[in-house]
Amino acid sequence: MPTVFFENACASKLAVNGENGFVFKEDENAWADQLIKIMKNKEQLKKIGERAKETIPQKWDDVIMQYYDFFSKAIENAKNRE
């Protein structure tokens, strides 16, 4: 399954829209319209998903843990300054 990114999100820099994922505007209606459109072409989804596995370097679980660690340390540092 290809990855879907919000436009202007840091992670969206990993995607080439329509090549290894999809980049959507951060708007619920536009997002829903795009999802409906791309879900209709199963072959395209499969190809883009395969390219995503080859070109997007990290699993989301790893990215989430990196951000969790980063923000946990930032919060701890902020508490220690008080």
Image (spheres, grey):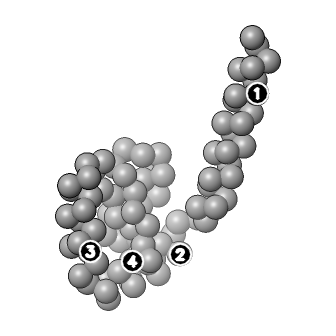
**Number of the front mark, 3 or 4:** 3
- First along the sequence among labels 1 and 4: 4
Type of amino acid at the residue the image marks with label 3: Ile
- Residue 1 seen anywhere in this rendered image of the structure: yes
Q: Secondary structure at mark 1?
A: helix
Nearest to the observer: residue 31 or residue 3: 31
Mark 3 to mark 4 CA distance (whole Å)? 11 Å
Is 1 positioned to the left or the right of 74 in the image?
Answer: left
Q: Residue furthest right?
A: 80
- Badge 3 is on which residue? 38
The residue positioned 42% from the left and 73% from the top of the image is 2
Badges 1 and 4: C-beta atoms under 8 Å apart? Answer: no
Task: Determine if residue 58 is in view.
Answer: no
Outermost residue to the bottom? 43
Q: Tag 4 or tag 3, which sits nearer the N-term? A: 3
Q: Which residue is mark 4?
A: 48
